[in-house]
Image: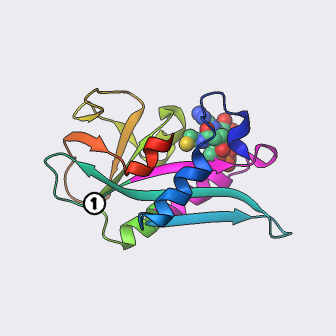
């Protein structure tokens, strides 16, 4: 698994995905498979709530690619496809908590108008799919409390 080598990972990602699934909150879930059918990457998108916002916003994560197949464009393909599926679901946008150097490639931008746990962070980024930029505290599904 890709997360086994990530020092900031709690190892909870598979449990988070399972809890999202059980909670009916796995809005978009994509896997990448190798030629032999084994899963080499996964990206999940689940609804988030943003205080004071009535629109439909989603959070990207977890996303992972097995270490031996990283930097081959698999993560990019999973994220791009997921975002286009969110657009097809009439999503207003997507947030992500992660490295801006990576997620900026997809159009995610940090925005101090958004907070997580009441605090602004450069790692919290949003991508507006339609309408205006949101403002408020971002709350992920309770499944992420397993992290
Ligand atoms: C992050 C991750 C999903 C990216 O998937 P990937 O298939 O390796 O990425 P892509 O091939 O689409 O993109 C590769 C590019 O992104 C860059 N990149 C990959 N991970 C990055 C990171 N954490 N921060 C900044 N840049 C990153 C690579 O250096 C590469 O840059 P280049 O195109 O200039 O060479 C994958 O590396 C991974 O599973 N990492 C471990 C788990 C993780 O950190 N998940 C994200 C937190 S939920």
Q: Residue at x 13, y 47 (%)?
A: 52
Relative image position of residue 58 (x, y in whole percent): 36, 56
Residue 10 position, x and y percent, is 60, 35
**Residue 121 lies within the magenta run:** no
Farthest residue, direction bottom: 88
Q: Quadrant of residue 51?
A: top left
Q: Nearer the viewer, residue 105 or 29?
A: 29
The boundaries of the magenta stretch are 59-82
Q: Determine if the C-beta at disc 1 is less than 8 A from ligand 1.
A: no
Identify whether 74 is placed above or below 112.
Answer: below
What residue is shown with label 1? Answer: 92
The answer to whether residue 112 is left or right of residue 30 is left
- Which residue is at a point 42% across and 46% down the rendered structure image? 107
CA neighbours of label 1 inside 10 A, class few (<14), some (14 to 19), many (20+): many
Question: Residue at left 38%, top 73%?
Answer: 88
Measuring from the top left, give residue 94's x and y in whole percent.
36, 53
Q: Seen from this angle, which residue lies furthest left? A: 52
Ligand 1 is found in which quarter of the picture?
top right
Residue under the point 68% across and 52% down: 73
Q: Is residue 33 above or below residue 42?
A: below
Asked whether 79 falls inside the magenta stretch, the response is yes
């Amino acid at each position: 698994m890709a997360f086994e080598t990530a020092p900031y990972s709690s190892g909870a990602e598979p449990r988070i995905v399972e809890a999202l699934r059980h909670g009916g909150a796995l809005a978009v879930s994509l896997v990448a498979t190798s030629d032999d059918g084994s899963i080499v990457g996964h990206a999940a998108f689940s609804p988030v709530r943003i205080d004071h916002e009535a629109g439909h916003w989603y959070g990207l994560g977890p996303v992972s690619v097995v270490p031996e197949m990283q930097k081959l464009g698999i993560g990019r393909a999973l994220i791009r496809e997921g975002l286009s599926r969110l657009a097809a679901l009439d999503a207003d946008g997507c947030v992500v908590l992660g490295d801006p150097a990576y997620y900026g490639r997809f159009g995610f931008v940090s925005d101090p108008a958004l907070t997580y746990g009441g605090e602004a962070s450069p790692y919290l980024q949003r991508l507006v799919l339609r309408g205006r930029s949101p403002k408020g505290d971002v709350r992920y599904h309770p499944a992420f409390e397993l992290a």
